[in-house]
Amino acid sequence: MNIRLTQVALASALVAGAAQVAVHAAAQTPSSVRVCTMPGSPSAELDKSVARAVLSTAGIAATFASRGIDDNGDDDGISARELSKSLQRDCDVIAGFPRSSVADGSDSQLLFSQGYLHSGYVSIALRGDHAADTNVAASDGKITIAATWSSPSQLIAVEQKNARFDLETTSKLTVDAVAKGRAQRAIVWYPAVVAYRRAHPQQHFDVAVAESPYADWNLVFASGPGTQQMQKRIDGALARLRSDGRLAALTRNWALPATIATVSATTRASLVRSPARYLDGPTQPSPRANVWRVSGMPAAGGFLKVAATTEAPSFDHDQVAHGEHLYADSCAKCHGEKLEGNTAPSLIGPAFAPAANSHLTIGGIYQYMSTNMPADHPGKMSDEEYADLMAFLLYTNGYDTGNAKLTAQAAQSSTTPLNAGPRH
């Protein structure tokens, strides 16, 4: 799958804040603007209502695109190139653009307003479902958790212990997986729960905040370079709507209930707050993604980075050579001949192995890779072959060869963070 920017609802995440795109510059003080929403967003109804109120208050006439940003009938997100084209072709401002502390877009050419909806990802279970409420596990000791493919919900879900995963293609289907009993729990963007309950008022869920650095999001207005004056007027309008209560009235039914909206100070302090980028790559599953049940699509993607502190395991030159051969045969078609990324993310460089402060472990990569890769035939290699492939990935990211072979057990149990290893 190509590097995608997904709406936080799907999260639909993936997170557009990191887009490095040359986008259309609207006039500094426009009298009218074209407004788009994010693809497949369950909050699109809210986004349009807020946009009407904000732009009217700002004295800017608004017309709404008949389709969302690059809306092709699904909600798999949007790439940087598609975003650029849509901003030039379809609209001047995007309503419902997702931002978070882990995808702040500080290096983006896009401009952002203040947030108008602070919400987040939640864990839901069917109310009254004893198996879900008590997390009764299957015979293998695992429960099934639904998540939305290539979104922050996938990132959060794979942090859960003792779980298998049901990956769905939309946030609506993720909620539906719990409603229809395909999963005991789901991790999903809260507005998707609101939208689902509006369509199915008989359905009731128990909802809890997902305690993760990837759970906390704001919806904002986004626009291209050269729109500073427009964004100032939007911010001014948001401030007026906030002070007179109109913004709260518009967003009340979409905001997290006060009873579940607060994450404990202890938990919040423990969350990783380092920058993450979801654009130009699928979201990144983490080390515990050991058993995937995929609904109608291959299990592929990048990786979530999990902090750790030990030394990297040893591997030898022969493993690197064999791993290179395995990579060329089974991985290069998606990840690129030089690991540069193609239809799947790059497996080399700072986006994969940063110089410091990585949150991805070697064991996490190995466990995900050996269970889910290659995407067209997950788990087809032997433990030794996956270990050799891991040795090749380590070597290409700057780690030195040694005298001892890398075993599958050593690779899987390694808690060493994948920081680029300067070769001596």
Image (cartoon, helix red, strand yellow):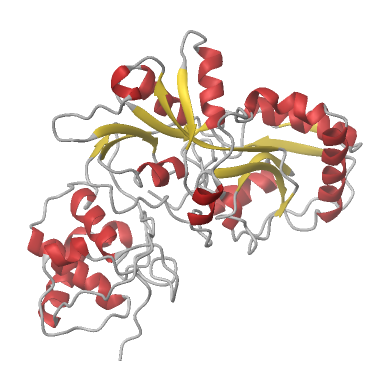
Report whether residue 383 is seen: yes
Residue 421 falls left or right of residue 39:
left
| Residue depicted at 53% across the width and 61% down the height | 275
Report whether residue 213 is seen: no
| Residue depicted at 27% across the width and 41% down the height | 298
Q: Which quarter of the figure is the C terminus placed in? A: bottom left
| Residue depicted at 46% across the width and 33% down the height | 188
Q: Residue 213 at x, y = what percent?
A: 50, 51
Which image quadrant for residue 331?
Answer: bottom left
Q: Residue 179 at x, y = what percent?
A: 38, 18
Q: Nearer the viewer, residue 402 or 244?
A: 244
| Residue depicted at 25% across the width and 77% down the height | 395
Relative to 326, residue 172 above or below: above
Relative to 259, residue 13 above or below: below
Q: Nearer the viewer, residue 295 or 336?
A: 295
Q: Residue 149 at x, y = what percent?
A: 39, 39
Report the label total: 0
Which image quadrant for residue 396?
Answer: bottom left
Residue 383 falls left or right of residue 76:
left
Relative to 202, residue 205 above or below: below
Q: Residue 308 at x, y = what percent?
A: 34, 66
Q: Residue furthest bottom?
A: 424
